[in-house]
Image (cartoon, rainbow, N blue to C red):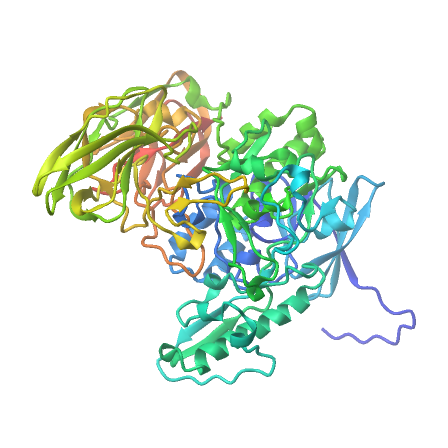
Amino acid sequence: MKIKESFAPAGREKKMIALTGDLIITGGGLSGICTAITAARNGLKVVLVQDRSVLGGNASSEVRLWILGATSHMGNNNRWSREGGVIDELLVENTYQNPEGNPIILDMILLDKVNREPNITLLLNTAVYEVEKNGPDTISELRAFCSQNSTKYVLRAPLFCDASGDGIVAFLAGAAFRMGAESKEEFDELMAPDTDYGELLGHSLYFYSKDTGLPVKFTPPSFALDVTKEIPRFRNFNAREHGCKLWWVEHGGRLDTVHDTEQIKWELWKIVYGVWDYIKNSGKFPEAENLTLEWVGMIPGKRESRRFEGDFMLSQKDLIEQRTHEDAVAFGGWSIDLHPADGVFSERQACNQWHSKGVFQIPYRTLYSRNVENLFFAGRIISVSHVAFGATRVMATSAYTGQSVAIAAVLCHQKLLNPADIYQQGHIKELQRMLMRSGQHIPGLSLHDDADLVNSASLQASSHLLFGGFSKLEVTWKLLEISAAQLLPLPKGLVPEIRISANALQVTSLHAELRISSRVGGFTPDVTLGTLHIPLSEGEQEILLNFNVALNEAAYVFVVFHKNPSVQLPYTEQRITGFVSAFNGVNKAVSNYGKQEPPEGTGVDEFEFWCPQRRPEGQNLLLTLLEPIDLFKAENVRNGIDRPTISPNAWVADPEDAAPQLVLEWDKAQTISRIELSFDTDFDHPMESVLMTHPEREMPFCVRNYLLKDDFGNTIFEKEGNYQTRNVIQLKEPAKTKKIILQVEHPSLRVPASVFAFRCYE
């Protein structure tokens, strides 16, 4: 191309492109990505505007923070709590493709997922800088600029979503917002910080190191800090930890975390290079001789800036008391995780993490502006107090709110509504139903979908598990060095007698308890129903646990064995959907020291932590029941709950069934175009996205191979090598049939096949 232009005295205009869609999303972090994908898959034309060259925000290779949410490093009492829908799909995909936790591969996965959606127009390196409005209450268009192609974009839509982290669209549109902490009095929050602790969380900047196999010298830049003089916790630095394990290298909480970000970044660079100077040149880390500084972040990971006001503001008591909301659309479960504003320069501990006893609901009214009629919020800017923000700010929770916004936008598009109208005009139940159909789990709710043809079919299974105890396959004996428990799902009625072997290294006694949660659907074993002290002679022996108690309703019980290092208990490698063992151990990563003991006057509960162990640990205790549990029937696949709650909610085939199958049959032929299946990808596994590695690519409970047949035995769909939770099957040609047969294979000899949901649509 050859261009020659003469002098233009009036100057020149930037190239301009106008784009129109149904929903404009600003921000390509996880919340924006999940909003965009969900909306696009539901038919909306979406423009996704991202001011960086990669997607993922704090999860991207530019920042490299792991994705976490309610599962909290498996360090809390939130069982089977990994978020569903698109964020689950992304985490499962990353674990399959990238169990090593390479942030570059995660970048690729996120970009690929967005690029696969024909309804998404993606603008990278494009920053929104101006908002135009039709009157004071309505956004008409955004203006954005891409530095890489020197192009101005004008973006028009009836609906807008701000998922930008700092809330640039909401800010420019004039929406009410807050920065800094509220007083204790405003929301009756006993955790509200005083001015000494500070009102904002700061930024962090990470680095990676690499062993080169040869000695490496390091000469620090002139701006590197002497961390031994300026950072009170400098002795916590070591040569082994890097990346987001150094989350506590934090700064900026006393500054404007929007407009002072570049200044904060420079201070963090000073700290990082000072840390590396200390590790390489202090002489205290001989193990660092061959290490080189492989990568240092160019932009800091932000925690907190603006929070915008919706029609409701979530606060401390909503989380700690696990309050229910009629407009619940999502959930969270991270601790209330607040940090001193002075960050790494503070004498205080790096964070205060206080957990609720379980997950908490997030209401729809927190996800749209109370001032700007066509503006949604997603991510960390939603309508919460500073204290509640300590829990809602993490990325998987942020992404989950984005999915809620996306389905709300679909409903607005269909009914010509503004966001607030969904609540104010009584469309919440429809929104919740649409969300659950898209894979969104909402605690306390179940899906009742009149369009699902499975509801009108007869349903039979070739077999189902009648659980009388675990298999003796690959038994391992372990010392009872920490208290252990087996979670058992039980129906209403008398608790069956339980048999287990024990090996005593000397004459001693075994202290056993039967516990449940005081909250229906909870997994904090804070109510003791029965206690047994069983004398043990030296050697292996069989013991019988008869607690002689009855349950008033179906629930998970904890069969607890208290710490006794003189006793060994047997564990099995058999794993079954809906069963898990838990331990009263320690997980310092989330301030779990076995028991939460908050200071008086914080409004936080005291309770014990009982958490699973990561595979290859975490085997089930090898116990048997004198009366089997019959909770795994085929009917579970249409109960509208796609994960364990108060019950397993899954059909589980008998392990001895060589050809497990489910059969749907109608009185007359049905036309079926779409089939949805939900499998078990272990919602307890947090699937941290970077740095940490994972023991397997596919979850051991997940059905890998299956096929679907019609009433003549014709195969209408076949899948090999499945590893995803939700399988949405759009048939190339609709099937007209009186019968649908789902044939599945057991994942392994250790794990019987299971299905959470089986749905069919015209």
Residue at 76% x, 44% y is 175
Viewer-nearest residue: 180 or 8: 180
Q: Residue furthest top?
A: 667
Residue at 46% x, 24% y is 671
Q: Position of residue 12 (x, y in %)?
A: 85, 67
- Residue 580 visible here: yes
Q: Position of residue 729 (x, y in %)?
A: 44, 36
Left or right of 420 in this view: 468: left
- Residue 119 visible here: no
Residue at 54% x, 60% y is 348
How many discs appear? 0
Q: Residue furthest right?
A: 9
- Height in image: 487 above or below 696? above
Viewer-nearest residue: 126 or 342: 342
Q: Quadrant of residue 161?
A: top right
Q: Position of residue 599 (x, y in %)?
A: 50, 45
Left or right of 327 in this view: 671: left
Q: Position of residue 209 (x, y in %)?
A: 44, 72
Viewer-nearest residue: 481 or 177: 481
